[in-house]
Amino acid sequence: MFNKQLIIGNLKPTFPVIQGGMGVGISLSSLAGHVAKCGGIGIISGAQIGYRDKDFIKDPLHANLVALKQEIKQAREIASNGIIGVNLMVAMKHYAEYVKAAVEAKIDLIISGAGLPLDLPKYTKDSDTKAVPIVSSAKAATIICKQWDRKYNFAPDAIIVEGPLAGGHLGFSAAHLENSPLLEDIILEVKEVVKEYSEKYNKSIPVIAAGGIYNGEDVAKMLEKGADGVQMATRFVTTHECDASLAFKEAYINSTEETIGIVKSPVGMPGRAILNTYITSPQGNKACFFDCLHKCGVTDIPYCISKALINAVTGDVDNALLFCGSNAYKATKLEYVEDIFNEIESALVIA
Ligand SMILES: Cc1cc2nc3c(=O)[nH]c(=O)nc-3n(C[C@H](O)[C@H](O)[C@H](O)COP(=O)(O)O)c2cc1C
């Protein structure tokens, strides 16, 4: 349909657009299913996905595994034959169990960042599920490709490059964020890295750009600069279909460029969010509620990140961590997922 088609193995979405996984609970079956139905790739976030289960606090792992399978099933029902994936963060405890559950549910692809998914092919290699790491540098891409090649005789099915303008946790140190390279430059470097593995395994390895891509023009520009596809998250938050509470979506609509900033997360990485005093001046609530992440400083945390993200999705926005991309302030109203794809289609046809 467009002069550039995104192809990830046998997966051929109409649009070269992946909707970024957003936890906790922001991208579940409704958003992912509707994106897939419109011809993009819909991604369910696996982070604390069972947060609505009555036994979640008692047994989060069980609640999360049940919800993961349920959300995949529901997304498939909405999407009919559309492409559905899950985002599973390497930093999550029980990562391997979530990966195995998603493969068992025959998910089309697993996207993994927040750490290097060095052992992802162990679980996906003998299945139809595609393995897609998220990186923020050519160095990280090299480490992953080398390890997968050496240990699993396998190359990534695609690589997502998340640049400095993205939402959620960022793969750059706070100092490096100030003068980080441009996303398009990292894309070109990562394309160089994958060349060797693409030839060795005789497969194309699309390199996908993420972070700050908000409208049709941005998509066209990134494709023109060499990306094989884009991942967009922030733009999809202010849709009717997004799984978050209305209050979370309204926080985006009411945000301004000045109220969006970089926050320190208990996981030790910087993140981008709509600033509020709960995060910028935490009032000493240092309790860890869920013991969910490997690198979380549980004994000395400013706030429990899972709790702050659950408060966000459920609408308690004053006591929440409101992750967002640098362009969240551009949202002025709620829209339908289909409107976004219509806009992208116009931009790509013109380009
Ligand atoms: C609210 C929110 C939650 C996010 N949660 C996750 C997550 O759980 N795991 C992850 O790998 N990325 C997460 N991200 C990053 C997105 O998947 C995506 O790569 C990034 O936001 C792209 O930039 P954009 O938002 O400017 O389009 C999140 C982003 C947002 C805005």
Image (cartoon, rainbow, N blue to C red):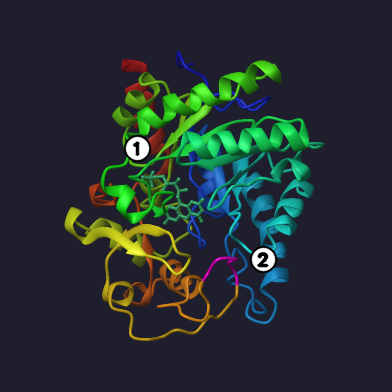
Numbered disc 1: secondary structure: loop
User: Can you say whether 214 is above or below 28 in the image?
Assistant: above
Q: Amino acid at mark 2?
A: Asn
Q: Cβ(mark 2) to ligand 1 < 8 Å? A: no
Residue 326 shows in the view: no
Above or below residue 118? Residue 16 is above
Secondary structure at numbered mark 2: helix
Q: Is residue 322 left or right of residue 295?
A: left
Q: Is mark 1 within 8 Å of ligand 1?
A: yes
Front-most of 300 and 129?
Answer: 300
The residue most toward the top is: 3
Front-lying residue, 226 or 5: 226
- The amino acid on which the numbered mark 1 sits, given as a three-letter code, is Ile
Does residue 282 appear to the left or right of 70 in the view shown? left
**Magenta segment main secondary structure:** loop
In the rendered image, the vertical position of residue 234 relative to residue 249, given as above or below: above
Q: Quadrant of the C terminus?
A: top left
Residue 213's disc number = 1
Give the residue at x 50% y 73%: 297
Query: How far apart are labels 2 and 1 at the CA level?
Result: 30 Å
**The magenta segment:** 292-296
Dot 2 alpha-carbon crowd within 10 angstroms: few under 14, some 14 to 19, many 20 or more: many
| Crowd band around label 1 with a 10 angstrom C-alpha radius: few (<14), some (14–19), many (20+) | many
Q: Residue 290: give x, y in percent of width and height.
A: 59, 76
Seen from the viewer's position, the closer of residues 105 and 241 is 105
Q: Position of residue 197 (x, y in %)?
A: 64, 23
Q: Earlier in the sequence, mark 2 or mark 1?
A: 2
Pointer 2: what residue?
64
Where residue 266 is drawn, which disc sits there? none
Question: Residue at 50% across / 41% down in the picture?
Answer: 135
